Image (cartoon, helix red, strand yellow):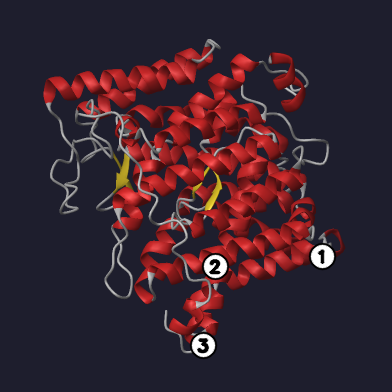
């Protein structure tokens, strides 16, 4: 059995072991399991044009099901340790921008169209060609930017970073670290950092599980409660738990309801909002999903030290095909577009190098359709220390960028800083690509810019100018 796994997933070839792959898969699951709860919170909180809301329970089941199936597919076909789940940012765009203008089935129909178009772009070789047109230092910059993005996600979810009153961001609550959940995060960060620094096997997994146990004990003793009231959506306890309250559920198993699967209308949006508005919505989804996934894949491959001399990960075509299918599957199940997850870096940091880790993560996600109450025990404050530590590990790729060469250093810098500062991988990539082309032209070196980089830079210019374009055609802001 072990030899079969080794041969199929190339475990020894990539310097790993079955044990490391299993640990890596477990870590990735625990780090991204929050999406089983968070995606339903985002989608169920919005209403469509008719005022209809999606069922929270059905969204939970659909989110876990699609993530599980597509992550297993990524492991078996892509043979790479990447988890797949509903894309953060994309689900917000779907819920708060698209849903109020049409019905939920029509919204999800646009997501299916977006995924199908991306699949065509992959199968025709266009997406791979774009990937290869990107200069190697910019690919490294994408990985570094994602590392900082992961870090700020970890700090923000834990409450270390919050919106400020006189400044864009502030430290903790009123400039102080307050509350028991914050203590759990700090302890988790310190313990995980020490374990990783000492190269303890399973260090990140130990940190997540240990922090969760501490969180459960803290909640049992001090009755901290949630920050936000689930019924009203209002802040009732600023020093409470950020998402999940870590207490043992009354029941561990619950029967999943897959009633949302297949509830999409692929052409309805074009009638509801008009052809041009629907096409602009699809274009926005495509550009964000297209480059978020590309950036995530190259960043994770760099962290796993699996990029070749051209900065390309193994089985790139297969990775991109699965990611495109995931977008279609997410729309078809009303779970929003699914894509490669940057949290997979935590499993890679634990030693995962092959698709076996993804299979482990995917199987656990499928179990989560029945074990949603148990998955909900892990709070942000126990999972996010892993993201901060992984952010550091991904920062190590910065050594591949020559910042003394301003023609590549400035685009790389913009790529890196705009990802965390704007909470978007696509924004960072777009700024880096556009500035790279402009600087090369200004330096009289336009011939160094590959044709597809011109095309992509122009596409991002449209992406950033989407609101003026809407106004130009009378579609509003």
Among the two numbered marks 3 and 1 on one chain, the one whose residue lies closer to the N terminus: 1
Q: Are marks 2 and 3 in contact (CB under 8 Å)?
A: no
Along the viewing direction, whichever of 172 and 245 lies nearer the viewer: 245
Residue 284: mark in rendering: 2
Classify residue 119 as left or right of residue 326. right
Q: Is residue 119 above or below residue 194?
A: below
User: How many numbered circles does the render carry?
Assistant: 3
Q: Residue at 39%, 75% (x, y): give it.
A: 102
Q: Secondary structure at mark 1?
A: helix
Which sits in the foreground, 328 or 167?
328
Task: Please tell me the numbered disc located at residue 472.
Answer: 3
Q: Is residue 167 visible?
A: no
| Relative horizontal placement of residue 397, taking residue 187 as reference (left or right) | right
Q: Is residue 137 above or below residue 91?
A: above
Which quadrant would residue 426 be assigned to in this image?
Answer: bottom right
Number of other residues with Cα within 10 Å of mark 3, as a class: few under 14, some 14 to 19, many 20 or more: few
Q: Give the labeled residue for mark 1.
A: 451
Q: Residue furthest right?
A: 447
In the image, what residue occupies the spot 49% across and 15% down? 203
Q: Give the CA distance from mark 2 to mark 1.
A: 22 Å
Q: Secondary structure at mark 3?
A: helix
* Front position among marks 2 and 1: 2
Q: Position of residue 202 (x, y in %)?
A: 51, 15
């Amino acid at each position: 059995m072990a030899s079969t796994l080794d041969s199929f997933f190339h475990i020894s070839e990539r310097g790993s072991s079955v044990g490391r792959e299993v640990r890596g898969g477990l870590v990735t699951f625990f780090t991204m399991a929050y999406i089983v709860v968070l995606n339903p919170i985002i989608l169920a909180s919005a209403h469509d044009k008719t005022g209809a809301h999606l069922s929270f329970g059905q969204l939970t089941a659909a989110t876990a099901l699609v993530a599980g199936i597509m992550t297993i597919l990524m492991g078996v076909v892509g043979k790479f340790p990447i988890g797949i789940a509903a894309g953060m940012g994309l689900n917000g765009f779907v819920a708060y921008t698209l849903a109020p203008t049409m019905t939920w089935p029509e919204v999800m129909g646009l997501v299916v169209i977006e995924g199908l178009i991306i699949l065509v772009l992959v199968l025709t070789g266009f997406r791979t060609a774009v990937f290869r047109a990107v200069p190697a230092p910019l690919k490294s910059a994408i990985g570094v930017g994602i590392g900082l993005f992961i870090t700020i996600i970890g700090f923000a979810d834990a409450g270390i970073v919050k919106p400020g009153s006189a400044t864009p961001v502030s430290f903790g609550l009123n400039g102080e670290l307050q509350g028991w959940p914050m203590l759990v995060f700090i302890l988790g960060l310190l313990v995980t950092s020490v374990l990783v620094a000492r190269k303890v096997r399973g260090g990140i997994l130990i940190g997540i599980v240990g922090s969760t146990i501490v969180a459960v004990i803290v909640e049992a003793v001090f009755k901290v409660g949630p920050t936000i009231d689930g019924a009203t959506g209002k802040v009732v306890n600023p020093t409470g738990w950020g998402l999940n309250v870590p207490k043992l559920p009354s029941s561990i198993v619950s029967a999943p309801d897959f009633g949302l699967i297949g509830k999409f209308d692929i052409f309805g949006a074009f009638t509801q909002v008009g052809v041009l508005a629907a096409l602009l919505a699809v274009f926005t989804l495509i550009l964000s999903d297209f480059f978020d996934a590309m950036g995530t894949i190259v960043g994770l491959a760099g962290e796993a030290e699996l990029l070749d001399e051209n900065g390309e990960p193994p089985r790139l075509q297969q990775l991109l095909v699965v990611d495109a299918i995931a977008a279609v599957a997410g729309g078809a199940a009303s779970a929003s577009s699914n894509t490669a997850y940057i949290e997979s870096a935590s499993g890679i940091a634990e030693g995962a190098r092959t698709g076996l880790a993804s299979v482990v993560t995917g199987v656990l996600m499928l179990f989560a359709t029945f074990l949603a109450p148990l998955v909900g025990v892990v709070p942000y404050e126990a999972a996010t220390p892993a993201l901060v530590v992984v952010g550091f590990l991904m920062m190590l790729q910065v050594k591949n960028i020559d910042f003394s060469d301003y023609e590549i250093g400035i685009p790389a810098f913009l790529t890196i800083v705009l990802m965390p500062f704007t909470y978007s991988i696509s924004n960072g990539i777009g700024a880096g690509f556009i500035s790279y082309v402009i600087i090369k032209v200004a330096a009289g070196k336009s011939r160094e810019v590959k044709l597809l980089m011109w095309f992509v830079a122009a596409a991002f210019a449209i992406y950033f100018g989407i609101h003026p374009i809407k106004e130009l055609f009378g579609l509003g802001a």
